[in-house]
Image (cartoon, grey):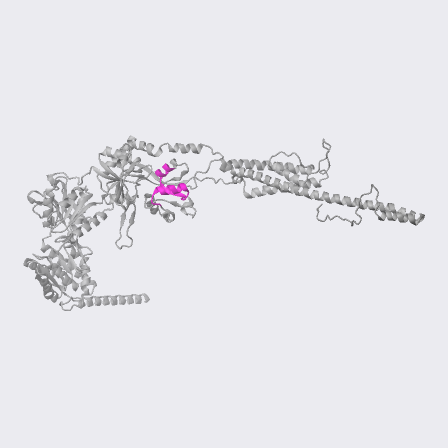
């Protein structure tokens, strides 16, 4: 029961939805009109009648007209006066609320279709042109609602490209008038020829563009310029009258004879003097106005049918007086018409591009025969199988210029070429001269350099690998040449000039730019083959294979004044110095406190030797370490002698290790490189103290820009890049640049010339040097074959031996094998140490002499003081003895009588002395010498 109720509810919902949908459809059907008026501005009464019949028949075609919908026609004849035409459109067409207007072309004049487009376009009423082919109608800023069932004249450029590819004509000259259509066909041809095929080798190159003002009187000057060009295929857009003048002058200059190819647009086929062998295009159904009327009405009906089912359609404006409202339905209708396709229209497959122009239009390829007969020799049509345009030509039926039955080559091979080169050792050496006679004709070639800043030519004489190659090529494939150096001294870079300018475009500089812009014919230089350059120029097969490598200066061990100390680290030297003095101290203590260290040994001369003191212990320790003879001051105790033997073993090991390491540091071979190659981590994550660079805009620079994994490295080195290789190599020699990344051939040559330079790591980015030529140059195959022949015959090997190898590698290898010898810079520190010892000894002896003299002066003073003290001491002693001898005499006098005593006393008081008594001053004070200032 429950399931039954659920199904019932779902059924009710579905019925309600169906009712709502039906109501919405009915509402739209009620809202949208059932009557649609279609206007026509036609060129003749026959076209008007056909227009009416087509509308009447349309109402019975269910495929285009839904049931209940009816179409009505309103048509007028085209007036040559565009103002009257515009007024008639307002009165007779817009006044009847037409949904679209089909417009033809007047019998005279060409402004009336534009008047219809302006008038209807103001209200966004779609206008379908059936004969107007001017390119101006493609501009939707002016003709906002204009479509057409015929293609503009500029679309013939699409057919040109396919015809050129069919005949394999890759270099052409374009001749066009300076009006809108002429410039439009040039622009479309250049765009289509460069983008229609992904194969860059098959892109059509425009050698020259000749533009002229309509209304020509003479074309001889332009034709003379064309005659000097290589291309012999001329594409021309011109009116009938201008084409008549061009063919007249071309015939006069014999430029319509054998070897020339002229392919023209429709108007240029009509002159009476069109030369025999001319090829041109003719639009199929171009003049069949009835067929275009039918296709335009069916396209309009299909658009209204599709629009009627999904959009709300409002009535169009009814007069031109109300200028304030714009019909929004008209914009939608224009978009719906543009999206329509008629698979089997009266004029073929009908479709429109974004500009409302007809695409997939069919053309006949016409060949002009004798007496102006036009014969179709091919067709350009829409293929339903591939859904693309297809070209079919009956090549065997074509009569070429000069009545030649075979297809011309399409170009003239010049026998004198302008060749460019660039100074790059050893491939090109350039020597500046004042006069061309200074060049050695046997080896050098004159190669002037144009100085743009001074507008002068500077003369140089060039020689080298590439110059010899150029001579061999000229002999092998028979051409003459004039040689010049690169104007800006660079190989060429693809850059944007005038970045501030809104229309700035990329362009080539240097050698490549000269070739791309056809200011030169050939480049013979060490020019690397890479994809960026190959897109714009042709390369021969490589004449030398090479890669990219890194040049650096060989690392040298720094020879400082303390080079002899390098075998040991600072810590080890300090430990050795400390060990000497510690061992000396221990030896002194052991010998001093040992019971067997202080005994005396009798010498031969009867003297005795004292025990070891501290000074002798230090002398002993240094003498053992330095392996010098020790004659005195050796330890006497057994314990000290054991330590002395251990110290001698230590000294032997230290001295042997020092000697071995010194030889390794000063004599052994130096490391050859600092870097291991391009994958070295120091290059990938460049440090501030490791600078690397290449040449700006070079093939190596392009290689790094292509490699994503090298992006970090490239961003770092980009700021260091040089303008030329010479300056970079010189900075490597001077130590200003750590690593220079460049072509292996050049860097290996530099390393062979200077043994202080070396290449690091393996080659990467392998490629080759090739001869550069213009895109599509007739010399490309000839140069390639000649180079291959040179490889087989050994000419290239001979050039390698002459210019690149030149026995320089052998010299460097011999230098590498020669053992390094010690020089003054290695051992200068030892000599300075000896000099310091000498100076130290002299200073010490001076100190010793001064000190000794000071000691002698002190000793003399002490002697004088000691002598004076001795004299004073003797006087005192004598006086004491005298007194001691007089005292007993006085005592005896007292006992014997007074007189005797008095006389004796008087004699004593008067100072009577004996002969042997020293003379002493009578009143001499006691003398005590002052010896406080003396140091004993």
Residue 168 figure quarter: top left
Instruction: Give the percent coordinates (x, y) of residue 734.
Output: 41, 42
Quadrant occupied by the C terminus: top right
Please tell me which residue is depicted at 9% across the width and 43% down the height of the picture.
Answer: 275
x and y, in percent, of residue 218 in the image: 11, 47
Front residue of 794/823: it is 823
User: Residue sitting at 62 percent across and 33 percent down?
Assistant: 629
Residue 233 in sight from this viewpoint:
no
Q: Residue furthest right?
A: 896
Q: Nearer the viewer, residue 329 or 310?
A: 329
Q: Quadrant of residue 95?
A: bottom left
Q: Tell whether position 748 is magenta.
A: yes
Q: Which residues are magenta?
A: 722-750
Please, is residue 733 above or below residue 142 in the view? Answer: above
Q: Nearer the viewer, residue 725 or 208?
A: 725
Quarter of the image that includes the N terminus: bottom left
Count numbered badges in the picture.
Answer: 0
């Amino acid at each position: 029961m429950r399931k039954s109720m659920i199904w019932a509810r779902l059924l009710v919902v579905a019925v309600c939805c169906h009712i709502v949908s039906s109501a919405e459809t009915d509402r739209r059907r009620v809202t949208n009109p059932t009557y649609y008026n279609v206007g026509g501005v036609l060129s003749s009464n026959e076209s008007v009648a056909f227009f009416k019949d087509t509308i009447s028949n349309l109402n019975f075609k269910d495929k285009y007209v839904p049931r209940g919908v009816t179409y009505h026609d309103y048509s007028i004849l085209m007036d040559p006066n565009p103002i009257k035409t515009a007024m008639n459109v307002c009165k007779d067409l817009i006044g009847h609320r037409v949904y679209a207007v089909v417009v033809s072309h007047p019998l005279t004049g060409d402004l009336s279709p534009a008047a219809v487009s302006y008038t209807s376009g103001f209200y966004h009423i779609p206008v379908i042109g059936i004969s107007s082919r001017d390119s101006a109608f493609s501009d939707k800023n002016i003709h906002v609602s204009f479509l057409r069932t015929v293609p503009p004249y500029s679309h013939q450029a699409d057919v040109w490209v396919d015809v050129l590819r069919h005949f394999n004509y890759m270099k052409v000259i374009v001749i066009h008038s300076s009006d809108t259509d002429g410039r439009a066909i040039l622009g479309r041809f250049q765009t289509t020829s460069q983008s229609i095929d992904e194969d860059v080798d098959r892109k059509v190159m425009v050698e020259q563009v000749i533009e002229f003002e309509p209304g020509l009187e003479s074309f001889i000057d332009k034709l003379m310029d064309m005659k000097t060009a290589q291309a012999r295929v001329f594409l021309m857009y011109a009116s009938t009258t201008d084409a008549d003048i061009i063919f007249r002058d071309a015939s006069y200059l014999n430029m319509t004879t054998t070897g020339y190819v002229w392919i023209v647009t429709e108007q240029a086929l009509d002159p009476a003097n069109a030369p025999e062998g001319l090829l041109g295009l003719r639009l199929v159904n171009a003049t069949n106005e009835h067929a275009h009327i039918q296709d335009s009405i069916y396209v309009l009906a299909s658009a209204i049918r599709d629009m009627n089912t999904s959009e709300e359609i409002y009535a169009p404006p009814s007069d031109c007086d109300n200028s304030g409202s714009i019909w929004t339905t008209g914009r939608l209708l224009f978009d719906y018409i543009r999206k329509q396709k008629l698979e089997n229209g009266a004029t073929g497959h009908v479709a429109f591009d974004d500009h409302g122009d007809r695409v997939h239009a069919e053309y006949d390829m016409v060949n002009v025969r004798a007496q102006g007969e036009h014969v179709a020799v091919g067709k350009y049509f829409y293929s339903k199988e591939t859904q693309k345009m297809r070209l079919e030509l009956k090549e065997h039926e074509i009569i070429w210029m000069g009545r030649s039955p075979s297809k011309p080559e399409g170009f003239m091979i010049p026998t004198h070429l302008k060749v460019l080169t660039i100074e790059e050792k050893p491939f090109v050496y350039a020597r500046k001269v004042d006069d061309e006679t200074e060049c050695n004709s046997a080896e050098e070639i004159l190669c002037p350099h144009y100085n743009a800043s001074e507008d002068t030519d500077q003369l140089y004489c060039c020689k080298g690998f590439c110059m010899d190659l150029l001579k061999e090529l000229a002999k092998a494939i028979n051409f003459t040449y004039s040689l010049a150096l690169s104007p800006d001294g660079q190989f060429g870079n693809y850059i944007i000039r005038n970045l501030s300018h809104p229309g700035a475009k990329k362009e080539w500089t240097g050698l490549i730019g000269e070739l791309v812009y056809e200011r030169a014919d050939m480049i013979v230089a060490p020019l690397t083959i890479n994809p960026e350059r190959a897109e714009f120029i042709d390369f021969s097969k490589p004449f030398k294979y090479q890669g990219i490598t890194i040049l650096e200066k060989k690392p040298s061990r720094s020879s400082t004044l303390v080079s002899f100390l390098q075998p040991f680290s600072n810590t080890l030297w300090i430990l050795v110095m400390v060990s000497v003095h510690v061992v000396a101290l221990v030896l002194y203590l052991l010998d001093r406190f040992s019971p067997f260290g202080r005994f005396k040994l009798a010498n031969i001369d009867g003297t005795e030797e004292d025990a070891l003191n501290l000074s002798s212990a230090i002398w002993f320790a240094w003498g053992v370490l330095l392996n010098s003879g020790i004659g005195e001051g050796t330890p006497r105790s057994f314990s000290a002698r054991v330590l002395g033997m251990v110290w001698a073993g230590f000294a032997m090991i230290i001295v042997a290790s020092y000697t071995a390491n010194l030889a390794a540091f000063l004599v052994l071979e130096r490391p050859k490189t600092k870097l291991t190659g391009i994958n070295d981590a120091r290059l990938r994550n460049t440090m501030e103290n490791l600078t690397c660079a290449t040449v700006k805009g070079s093939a190596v620079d392009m290689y790094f820009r292509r490699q994503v994994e090298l992006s970090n490295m490239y961003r770092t080195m980009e700021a260091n890049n040089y303008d030329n290789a010479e300056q970079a190599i010189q900075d490597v020699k001077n130590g200003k640049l750590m690593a220079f990344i460049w072509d292996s051939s050049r860097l290996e040559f530099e390393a062979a010339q200077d043994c202080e330079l070396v290449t690091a790591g393996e080659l990467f980015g392998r490629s080759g040097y090739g001869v550069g030529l213009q895109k599509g140059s007739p010399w490309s195959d000839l140069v390639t074959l000649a180079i291959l022949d040179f490889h087989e015959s050994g000419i290239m090997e001979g050039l390698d031996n002459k210019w690149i190898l030149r026995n320089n590698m052998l010299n460097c290898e011999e230098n590498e094998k020669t053992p390094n010898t010690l020089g003054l810079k290695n051992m200068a520190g030892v000599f300075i140490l000896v000099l310091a010892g000498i100076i130290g000894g002299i200073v010490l002896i001076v100190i010793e002499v001064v000190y000794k003299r000071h000691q002698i002066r002190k000793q003399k003073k002490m002697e004088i003081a000691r002598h004076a003290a001795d004299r004073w001491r003797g006087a005192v002693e004598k006086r004491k003895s005298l007194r001691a001898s007089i005292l007993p005499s006085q005592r005896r006098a007292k006992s014997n009588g007074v007189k005797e005593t008095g006389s004796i006393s008087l004699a004593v008081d008067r100072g009577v002395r004996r002969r042997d008594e020293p003379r002493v001053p009578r009143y001499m004070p006691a003398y005590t010498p002052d010896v406080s200032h003396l140091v004993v």
